[in-house]
Image: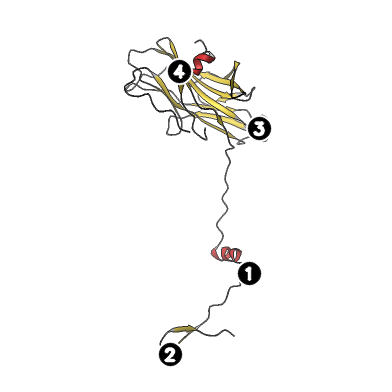
Amino acid sequence: MNQPSRRKVAAGIAWSIPAITVGAAAPAVAASQVSPGIRRAFYITRSSSGCSSGGRLTVDSKNDSTSYYQIVNVSPASSVTAVYASVLVNLSGLRFTTTTGNWSPVQQDSQTYSYNGVTYYRYFAKLQVAIPAPVNGTITVPPLSWVSNCTTSLLNQVSVNGRGTVTINGQDIVQIGAFRTLRWLLEVHVAPIPPLEFLLQCDRPSRRFMTPRPFRRGSRGRLLPTRGR
């Protein structure tokens, strides 16, 4: 498949990646529109998981409520001949490995892309297994999972952009996500809740705990505390 030109990519259907991915996916193509399109959201994270230093990127499409890759409005007579997944990153030289056998090895494109004065590098893979038949006009693309090498370059600001490209009836259809800046995905360790007495002592360090006083009954039957000694 010929790689889409920058002008052709810019004319693609807009979408957005999940936030913290990096938000919500673009809405599906309207029912009245019969042209095929792409509905997709990749889950992209940056963390230090498994790294002795630096960080790594992960890219997932699991076909769940968080991440997915679908081709919509596909007629039974349509010919889908190629499916690509791409991620643009403002870092060059990343080495991704794929943990699923459905996709080709991830490669870095020699072409660079620019957005808001930032240079991006494209990493992509092609679906290698048979493309599923459409169900009610929708093709659910098999899941993908990429993991990058650990590198200290990922300690700096990292911006990403996800894309999907399919060839239907000889025509390339490109869907482009929003450009996002990633935050660190942190592991949160929750300490055990201290006992109530400890919390009270911390909240009121200037007060001391008083021993409960016995009560006496007043002249009208009311309970009154005895005087402390």
Q: Which structural element holds mark 2?
A: loop
In the picture of the structure, the residue carrying the numbered disc 1 is 206
Q: Nearer the viewer, residue 194 or 37?
A: 37
Compared to residue 177, the image places residue 225 above or below, namely below
Q: Nearer the viewer, residue 188 or 160?
A: 160
Residue placed most toward the observer, 31 or 225: 31
User: Percent from the top left, x then y, of residue 82?
Assistant: 45, 14
Disc 4 or disc 2, which is closer to the eye?
A: 2
At numbered mark 1, what does the secondary structure look like: helix, strand or loop? Answer: loop
Marks 4 and 1, the one that precedes in the sequence: 4
Q: Cβ–Cβ below 8 Å for labels 4 and 3?
A: no
Q: Which mark is residue 156?
A: 3
Q: What is the C-alpha distance between the residues marked 4 and 1?
A: 70 Å
In space, the residues marked 2 and 3 are separated at their CA atoms by 76 Å
**Mark 4 → mark 2, Cα distance in angstroms:** 92 Å
**Given this view, does label 4 or label 3 mark the residue nearer the observer?**
3
Q: What's the residue type where badge 4 is placed?
A: Val
Answer above or below: position of 187 versus 129.
Answer: below
Q: Secondary structure at mark 4?
A: loop
Q: Would you name the residue on which mark 2 appears?
A: 219
Q: Residue at x 45, y 83 (%)?
A: 223
